[in-house]
Amino acid sequence: MLDFICLGSGSCGNCYYLFTEQYGILIDLGIGIRSFKKYFREYGLSFNKVNAILITHDHTDHIKAAGAFSTEFHVPVYATEAVHAGMLRNRFMQKKVGAAERHYFACGNTFALGPFRISTFKVPHDSSENCGYYVECEGVSFCLMTDAGSLTEDMARFIPLSDYLVIEANYDAAMLAGGPYPMFLQKRISGLNGHMCNEETARGLAENLTGRTKKVWLCHLSEENNHPELARKTVENALAAVQDRLNEAFTLEVLKRKVPSPLYHLA
Ligand SMILES: [Zn+2]
Ligand SMILES: [Zn+2]
């Protein structure tokens, strides 16, 4: 058994949980600790089965409660040296990750945690560093790439290897350009170290998806500069051109910003 749930996705907080009967890993814990605990209880999930927390990068929406949860339940937190250092500097974390719980890896390396084999890869973003995760378990592969200024070759090579993929579709280019954000912020978001827009994600998926991938979730949608239906349509339109290359059972979903997803059974 391998299950997946998203407990939040976007600038208000990101949190993803993958677990087997015996072992669970969180990728990012950027929602508040109270919401996190409430959702876990509502879904009948056990805090004791969170064996590790993996961090993508040191922006508050990905780390807010990582220290608090790690401290309370003595859960190790895995991140690169630069991201751990960035977390120690971040003033908005509810609690810091204790020295004993800090575990380090180099982005690009592969390591094992319980039944999970975890490969990491660089994702361009304006944080201390940012890692994508490609996770293999029970014969299934799951990949998460978010907060990406662009889709690099290093990232794209994981798309055809993924049975399940979570990928950012942050903003619609026209909505961002015509929206309320000041120019400096628009440039930050659309820059090569900012976020991916719907069009770029759509193109990247159309170019790289194969029959292997069963499901793609679009994540980290902007509240002001995107709309779930617009993101979905943009990707669907691009994928229509490569329909015969996709898995017959392929589905596309958009993750909600502040509401947990359903529980998905991946294996
Ligand atoms: Zn983010
Ligand atoms: Zn970020």
Image (cartoon, rainbow, N blue to C red):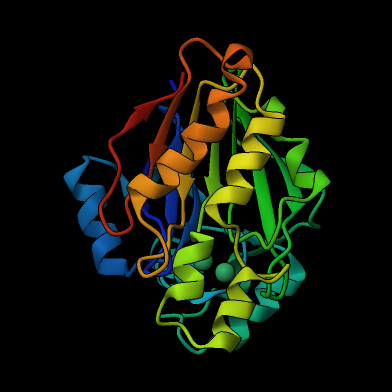
Q: Residue at x 75, y 70 (%)?
A: 81
The quadrant holding residue 72 is: bottom left
Q: Residue at x 55, y 14 (%)?
A: 247
The quadrant holding residue 104 is: bottom right
Where is residue 259 shown, x and y percent of the image? 25, 53
Q: Is residue 242 visible?
A: yes
Q: Is residue 95 left or right of residue 129?
A: left
Where is residue 224 shown, x and y percent of the image? 37, 70
Q: How many labels were placed on the picture? A: 0
Nearer to me, 238 or 140: 238
Where is residue 54 shown, x and y percent of the image? 58, 55
Q: Is residue 174 above or below residue 86?
A: above
Where is residue 166 shown, x and y percent of the image? 53, 41
Q: Is residue 54 above or below residue 5?
A: below
Q: Residue at x 53, y 24 (%)?
A: 240
Q: Residue at x 56, y 58 (%)?
A: 76
Nearer to me, 231 or 45: 231
Quadrant containing the N terminus in the rendered view:
top left
Nearer to me, 175 or 46: 175
Q: Is residue 166 above or below residue 33?
A: above
Q: Is residue 53 visible?
A: no
Q: Is residue 162 left or right of residue 104?
A: left
Q: Residue furthest left?
A: 42
The quadrant holding residue 4 is: top left
